[in-house]
Image (tube, grey):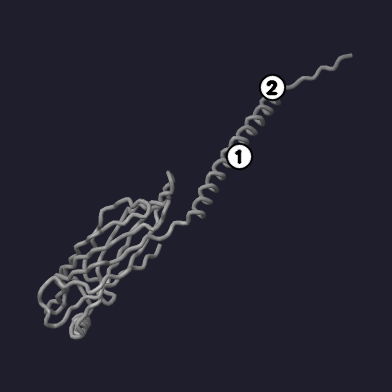
């Protein structure tokens, strides 16, 4: 006697659904494995190359105007020209500078408005010259600012700081990283005696800057 098995349509549909779900899981696992492997390769390349921070140096700072008004609020008017060298020390990593904001400071106080430098790409071991003309009009400063300036002028020199805030991206082959914030701090020693009235007053010596990412 032969045995006849009967499968309901509902049972077939359920079995087909299980097969479809299994295929989806396999596809998801395959793509996940592929992308995980790709990210791992990129991460290993990143660790091997390990990009070094860009190097900046302030070669010249020329002061055209640095005056505190005699009014009750003592606002500051300033104009300063900066010359900066930027170097990419990496042999196999390029740098995209997407945003660069520069301003000058004196004794922890901002003495110019921010100036925006145009974005640019810096190739391997490339050196670029950057210039910025900074101005400040009626800027509020601390009441002690004028006293500190007079004291430094009597000593014959003023220390001016240059601050840069920006965003950069690393380029390794065809891979471009996400954006990283960075900060640059420089100082310039400027001869600024009480009897010096001819402008511009230039920095005595250049200085290498510190960079934080």
- Foreground mark, 2 or 1? 1
Pointer 2: what residue? 9
Q: Is residue 143 visible?
A: no
Against 71, residue 119 (above or below) is above
* Quadrant housing residue 185: bottom left
Residue at 22% over, 74% down = 204
Residue at 49% over, 52% down = 46
**Circle 1 residues within 10 Å: few <14, some 14–19, many ≥20:** few
The answer to whether 145 appears left or right of 51 in the picture is left
Residue at 66% over, 25% down = 13
Against 90, residue 107 (above or below) is below
Against 180, residue 185 (above or below) is below
Label 2: state its secondary structure.
helix
**Residue 114 position within the rendered picture, expressed as x and y whole percent measured from the top left:** 24, 63
**Residue 42 position within the rendered picture, expressed as x and y whole percent measured from the top left:** 51, 48
- In three-dimensional space, the C-alpha distance between marks 2 and 1, rounded to whole angstroms, equals 31 Å
Question: Which residue is at the front of the view, 207 or 145?
Answer: 207
**Residue 76 position within the rendered picture, expressed as x and y whole percent measured from the top left:** 17, 73
Quadrant where the N terminus sits is top right
Q: Earlier in the sequence, mark 2 or mark 1?
A: 2
Q: Which mark is residue 29?
A: 1
* Quadrant housing residue 146: bottom left
């Amino acid at each position: 006697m032969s045995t006849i098995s009967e499968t309901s349509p509902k049972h077939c549909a359920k079995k087909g659904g299980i097969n479809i779900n299994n295929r989806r899981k396999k596809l998801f696992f395959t793509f996940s494995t592929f992308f995980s492997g790709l990210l791992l390769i990129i991460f290993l390349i990143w660790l091997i190359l390990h990009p070094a921070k860009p190097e900046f140096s302030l070669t010249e700072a020329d002061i055209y105007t640095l005056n505190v008004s005699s009014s009750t609020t003592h606002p500051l008017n300033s104009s300063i020209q900066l010359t900066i060298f930027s170097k990419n020390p990496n042999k196999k990593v390029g740098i995209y500078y997407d945003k660069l904001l520069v301003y000058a400071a004196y004794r922890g106080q901002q003495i110019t408005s921010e100036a925006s430098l145009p974005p640019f790409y810096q190739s391997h071991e490339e050196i670029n010259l950057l210039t910025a003309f900074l101005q400040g009009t009626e800027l509020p400063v601390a009441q002690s600012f004028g006293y500190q300036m007079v004291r430094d002028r009597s000593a014959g020199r003023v220390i001016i700081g240059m601050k840069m805030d920006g965003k950069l991206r690393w380029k390794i082959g065809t891979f471009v990283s996400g954006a990283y914030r960075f900060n640059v701090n420089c100082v310039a020693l400027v001869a600024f005696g009480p009897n010096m009235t001819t402008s511009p007053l230039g920095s005595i010596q250049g200085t290498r800057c510190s960079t934080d990412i």
